[in-house]
Image (tube, coloured by chain):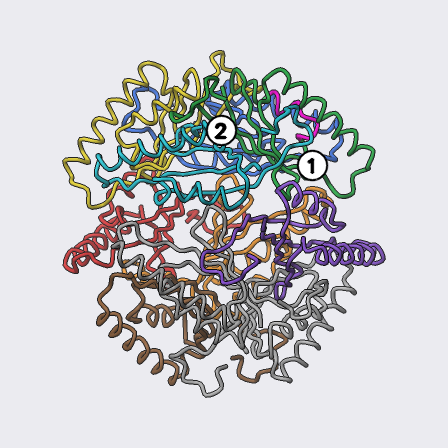
Chain colours: B purple, D brown, E orange, F red, G blue, H yellow, I green, J cyan
Amino acid sequence: MLYHVRMDVLIPTDMDTDKVNELKATEKALSQKLQEQGKWRHIWRIAGQYSNFSIFDVESNEELHDIMMSLPLYPYMKVEVTPLLRHPSSVRSDDS
Amino acid sequence: MLYHVRMDVLIPTDMDTDKVNELKATEKALSQKLQEQGKWRHIWRIAGQYSNFSIFDVESNEELHDIMMSLPLYPYMKVEVTPLLRHPSSVRSDDS
Amino acid sequence: MLYHVRMDVLIPTDMDTDKVNELKATEKALSQKLQEQGKWRHIWRIAGQYSNFSIFDVESNEELHDIMMSLPLYPYMKVEVTPLLRHPSSVRSDDS
Amino acid sequence: MLYHVRMDVLIPTDMDTDKVNELKATEKALSQKLQEQGKWRHIWRIAGQYSNFSIFDVESNEELHDIMMSLPLYPYMKVEVTPLLRHPSSVRSDDS
Amino acid sequence: MLYHVRMDVLIPTDMDTDKVNELKATEKALSQKLQEQGKWRHIWRIAGQYSNFSIFDVESNEELHDIMMSLPLYPYMKVEVTPLLRHPSSVRSDDS
Amino acid sequence: MLYHVRMDVLIPTDMDTDKVNELKATEKALSQKLQEQGKWRHIWRIAGQYSNFSIFDVESNEELHDIMMSLPLYPYMKVEVTPLLRHPSSVRSDDS
Amino acid sequence: MLYHVRMDVLIPTDMDTDKVNELKATEKALSQKLQEQGKWRHIWRIAGQYSNFSIFDVESNEELHDIMMSLPLYPYMKVEVTPLLRHPSSVRSDDS
Amino acid sequence: MLYHVRMDVLIPTDMDTDKVNELKATEKALSQKLQEQGKWRHIWRIAGQYSNFSIFDVESNEELHDIMMSLPLYPYMKVEVTPLLRHPSSVRSDDS
Amino acid sequence: MLYHVRMDVLIPTDMDTDKVNELKATEKALSQKLQEQGKWRHIWRIAGQYSNFSIFDVESNEELHDIMMSLPLYPYMKVEVTPLLRHPSSVRSDDS
Amino acid sequence: MLYHVRMDVLIPTDMDTDKVNELKATEKALSQKLQEQGKWRHIWRIAGQYSNFSIFDVESNEELHDIMMSLPLYPYMKVEVTPLLRHPSSVRSDDS
């Protein structure tokens, strides 16, 4: 099942640089693992913003929630979730 | 170059049914042609809304604009465009 | 899977009374059928508004969308969908 | 009498972990006691958010207010209250 | 039980004058009957607006809703309801 | 002359408890003195919020402003002022 | 007593030209009479908008309301009223 | 040339009292000098707010900007600028 | 003196095509005359919208207002004006 | 390719003056280098604000993003990006 998520990351400007780097590295590793599993189908950077639009393909609202809560940067994010479905005009065979 | 577009379609409730159906059919045909050309990369329906999130992959701002203006339903749409780029955490080879 | 939906109904003040009554009767019948099937779990009126908060329990985003689109009053509604899940503090056995 | 309440919890990122855990545990215990008393009829997690939609069934505006003020996490919440009533299309015998 | 209601009345500029006058007269008569019954405790005009702030004292959310729906001008109103209670600093004996 | 004022009080969560209690006690004493003088005609708590709706009956915009500025909790308030007048449908003899 | 009023005039594009001109002429004549009486102290056009910022100096909220309601263009205006008072830094002798 | 400026002053509640008083005194002195020069034509307090509406009469956008930047309280202000012009209904000879 | 103007054009979908074309042609001719005079310094289309961002270089707020009011499409525009000035980091000799 | 960017700079009022000055000097130097390269085509100050409207002329969304991220003041900015294109009414030969 597909979900559209916008994440705006707001790291405090006074956070310790090492901690910021570690958070970002852990976030990236987890994001890539989830992409390889096919759960995090797409991630795009929004031009000029420290933000992304992502598409998730998961079993349920619960799984989406659990993934979001597991993200190391979640406490510094503003998150907006929109449930999606296949569009009747889509030509893709896999709804993605 | 990638763009994220949200389209909210607001067809007047008193429009002639035949005209509505014709507009929708022409819109669908054009959308599918553009998808097959690789310019309209993704289109998803937003659950509960007569709206979609789409990803376009075009040469320039100009080409995106020309495509939007060519859509038969454009006069009945509220449109929001966001320029995108490859995310540093993306594992895809084609940036899509 | 659970969804929270707010529906604000805005019937034009100049619509023919018979048509309004027929729309409302058909809407009510469909709503009650879906409630009896367990798909439309709750519906509450918002005090002072021609609006409701509803809880749906359906298989997927697709099923929610199809139900919304089948409502006779949908063309006159403003709809807001929020995906839900069981709360860790809930004492209910059925997540509802 | 029924009320719909949305609670968005915003715990400061620098709060002591022990204090956070204690607040959450006390909140959960109180929530469950109120659920068992039938006053806090429903609580659902909003997907991707540290927020909930809840339904309260209490005697009066005063009782709702007193319950909200007694919540250990109240000082960290943004709260939105909407008074509800039985919907004419509801098939439930208990208005809940 | 007390409720604060803001009503913004938006009568279409092309409505027939006789119908407008009749609606206003019926609205006024009903408002005054409800005031005399003690249910519509206060009504104030907002300076420069065709709007009012009102205080209702009724048995329940249901009674408030039924009153609002019975107002002849309701179809032309934007309504905002806020549940109230006695303030701990109030010196009034009757909570009004 | 009548004014409607909404006050949302936002005391910082880290303020010293003694200072908070002293501020609240002084605020309450002043509020009650002004109520007894007939200048602060009504004060109601908004359910679920640390906020109130109040009605003031004062000589002028200046007097309203001076009262607001004299409130001990003013530095922690978001304030919204709306000038009022007697409503033509009011049955009260004293415009209150 | 001073009030700041913003008026945004929204005349329907299909209104009869003669009616528009008559409304504007009557509005202007009344505005100038009120300016000469000292009640409508200032009126400024907002650059690029069919809108104005005005300052009124009247006896009460009631008088301000009656003036606004008497304006021929009132049914086509969006109006925002803000009560004012002499600023402690003002050097003017007449508070205007 | 005329400009309408709204200034909302937000001095942090923990600023040193002496510093606050000094800032306010310097601000007032500068404001009065500019009023005497005819550049700051009007300043009014907004009832119930630590805010003002002001009218400036300066040579250019540049001069307005330089004045705003020179205000001691500018770092603590939210500022909104609107360019104005003489209104065709104004009876004043000096456009002010 | 420089101004930034955003214009969103909203031509009713039921306007006669000939009238639309004539309005657009007259608008274009006037825009180009003003560009050649150096008063309308820049005009850019916003991608995906029937809107533009423009820069005007005129003598005063009055001249800007008169130009805006002279535009044939003005009655169908939502307009937002922002006064500008040379930026201290600009390397241009002509402030444009 | 052209982009319109609004930047609102919000430097914390308690930042060390030397650090502020250094940040501003580095920002200015980089801005001027980019202007001389033709990538940062225009920059205007917004009157009364510590903000600018800028026009960028770059190869792609990616290049725009990289420039924004390289700005020393970026961590203190609110940024809004709008993709632009040549307007059909423009008389300029270089689309700028």
Whole-percent x, y for residue F87 in the image: 50, 46
Quadrant of residue I49 within the rendered picture:
top right
Q: Residue at x 29, y 35 (%)?
A: H75
Dot 1, crowdedness within 10 Å: few (<14), some or many (≥20)? Answer: few
Q: Spot the residue most to the right.
A: B18
Q: Residue at x 58, y 83 (%)?
A: D92
Does the stretch in magenta take in B19? no
> Disc 2 on helix, strand or loop?
strand
Quadrant of residue D39 within the rendered picture:
bottom left
Measured in 3D between alpha carbons, the distance from the residue under mark 1 to the one under mark 2, in whole angstroms, is: 38 Å
Kindly indicate whether the residue at mark 2 contacts the one at mark 1 (C-beta within 8 angstroms): no
The residue range painted magenta reads I66-74
Q: Is residue D14 above or below residue H19?
A: below
J12 vs F55, nearest the viewer: J12
Q: Residue at x 59, y 17 (%)?
A: I38
Question: Label 2, on which residue?
Answer: J42
> Disc 1 on helix, strand or loop?
loop
Q: Are marks 1 and 2 on the same chain?
A: no
Whole-percent x, y for residue D91 in the image: 61, 82
Name the subunit of mark 2: J
Quadrant of residue H71 within the rendered picture:
top left
How many numbered dots are placed on residues in this image? 2
Whole-percent x, y for residue J2 in the image: 56, 36
Q: Amino acid at mark 2?
A: His
Q: Is residue H93 above or below residue J86?
A: above
Q: On the rendered structure, is H15 left or right of H68?
A: left
Name the subunit of mark 1: G
Q: On the rendered structure, is G77 left or right of J19?
A: right
Question: Label 1, on which residue?
Answer: G12
Q: Main secondary structure of the magenta part?
A: helix
G30 vs F69, nearest the viewer: F69
Whole-percent x, y for residue I52 in the image: 61, 34
